[in-house]
């Protein structure tokens, strides 16, 4: 089984600070994830000046005065910052990823040599954007929050027709609410996506705990993405719905355990339980003393541990046969 690809989503939880961003990379490395992901955008190109904040953004920032533009502008990372973070990730041996939100950002990430392009849920209906990424012919991870199956199908067709190989695309089920209420997760839809499009699938999670991520892996997710932060109480739109360092560690450990535990799907005695078969299973034994020539019957034989004698599944064959030697009580027949 291929290892689950775990993306720790730092997103904008660096609050615009390179130092915080590096601390987030350190946390991701310590947790053992495969990749740490940021967000690349030019605010002017993605958000209209008077676009309102989402309710969760107002709630999580305790500020309904500033616009979405003002909030996001503070969280922008410039080209220099990207170069610094990419080289920092290289020294730490972790894959740097970032989600582009506009054409200039796609260009920037392509120039910086990104191997995988992550498409966020909000861009799944953005035809020129999808076409631009599709043309690059890179690996693509597509998030599908707020989308119907038909919209996923359209997005996949655009990516593939623009030049991306289908086998290079992974589709993530997601719910675009921070945090996501459990009753809105609809994890079974993740499997529907995989089956419908015959494509590798995974899950991008915005719930508060880690149990849904573990369940997703058990249901066949090949990729998990999860927001994390240094501290949930920090100012900013996404900290509240993010994992703290210890929780991220626990999630990775649980996912790696589940990966191991899923196994091969062949049902047979495992390496560790084979030595216990004789101890836990039973054999046919003498219930009382039996003399040679006596008939074996329900009165004088029974079934007890250990399991190194005649298998009790042969009971009907043994009952009615004749003892060819003497037996003491509890002796294996």
Image (cartoon, rainbow, N blue to C red):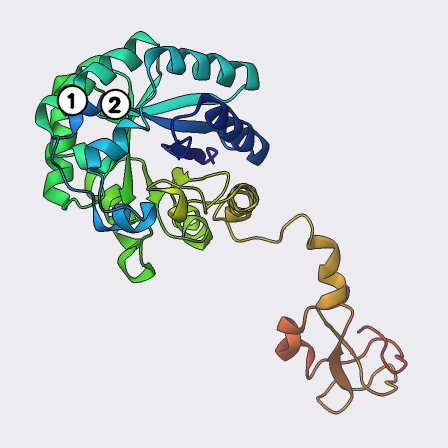
- Place of residue 106 in the rendered image (x, y in percent of width and height, measured from the top left): 23, 17
Using the rendered view, name the quadrant where residue 99 is placed.
Answer: top left
Residue underneath mark 2: 41
Residue 45: assigned label: 1
Residue located 39% across and 41% down the image = 235
Q: Is residue 209 visible?
A: yes
Does residue 111 appear to the left or right of 232 in the view shown? left
- Place of residue 100 in the rendered image (x, y in percent of width and height, measured from the top left): 26, 23
- Place of residue 45 in the rendered image (x, y in percent of width and height, measured from the top left): 15, 22
Q: In this view, does 94 lie above or below 228?
A: above
- Place of residue 136 in the rendered image (x, y in percent of width and height, measured from the top left): 22, 13
Using the rendered view, name the quadrant where residue 181 is placed.
Answer: bottom left
In the rendered image, the residue lying farthest to the top is: 111
Quarter of the picture holding the C terminus: bottom right
Give the structural element (helix, strand or loop) at label 2: loop
Q: Nearer the viewer, residue 257 or 53?
A: 53
Residue located 38% across and 23% down the image = 97
Mark 1 touches mark 2? (CB < 8 Å)? yes
């Amino acid at each position: 089984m291929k290892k689950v690809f775990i993306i720790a989503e730092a997103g904008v939880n660096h609050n615009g600070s390179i130092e915080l961003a590096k601390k987030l990379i350190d946390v991701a490395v310590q947790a053992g994830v495969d990749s740490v992901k940021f967000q690349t955008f030019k605010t002017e190109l993605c958000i209209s000046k008077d676009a309102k904040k989402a309710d969760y953004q107002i709630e999580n920032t305790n500020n309904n005065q500033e616009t979405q533009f003002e909030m996001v502008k503070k969280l922008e990372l410039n080209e220099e910052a990207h170069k610094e973070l990419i080289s920092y990730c290289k020294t730490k041996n972790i894959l740097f990823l970032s989600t582009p939100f506009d054409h200039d950002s796609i260009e920037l990430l392509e120039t910086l040599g990104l191997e995988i392009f992550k498409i966020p849920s909000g861009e799944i209906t953005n035809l020129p954007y999808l076409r631009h990424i599709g043309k690059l012919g890179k690996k693509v991870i597509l998030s599908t929050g707020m989308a119907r199956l038909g919209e996923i199908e359209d997005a996949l067709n655009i990516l593939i027709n623009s030049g991306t190989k289908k086998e290079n695309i992974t589709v993530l089920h997601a719910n675009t609410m921070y945090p996501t209420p459990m009753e809105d997760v609809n994890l079974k839809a993740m499997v529907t996506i995989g089956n419908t499009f015959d494509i590798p699938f995974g899950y991008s999670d915005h719930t508060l705990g880690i149990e849904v991520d573990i369940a997703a892996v058990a249901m066949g997710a090949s990729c998990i993405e999860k927001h994390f932060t240094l501290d949930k109480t920090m100012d900013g739109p996404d900290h509240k719905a993010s994992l703290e360092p210890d929780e991220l560690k626990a999630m990775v450990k649980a996912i790696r355990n589940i990966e191991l535990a899923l196994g091969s799907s062949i049902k047979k005695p495992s390496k560790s339980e084979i030595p216990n078969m004789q101890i836990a299973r039973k054999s046919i034994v003498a219930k009382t003393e039996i003399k040679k020539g006596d008939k074996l019957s329900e009165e004088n034989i029974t079934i007890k541990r250990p399991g190194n004698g005649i298998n009790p599944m042969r009971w009907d064959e043994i009952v009615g046969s004749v003892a060819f030697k003497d037996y003491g009580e509890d002796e294996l027949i």
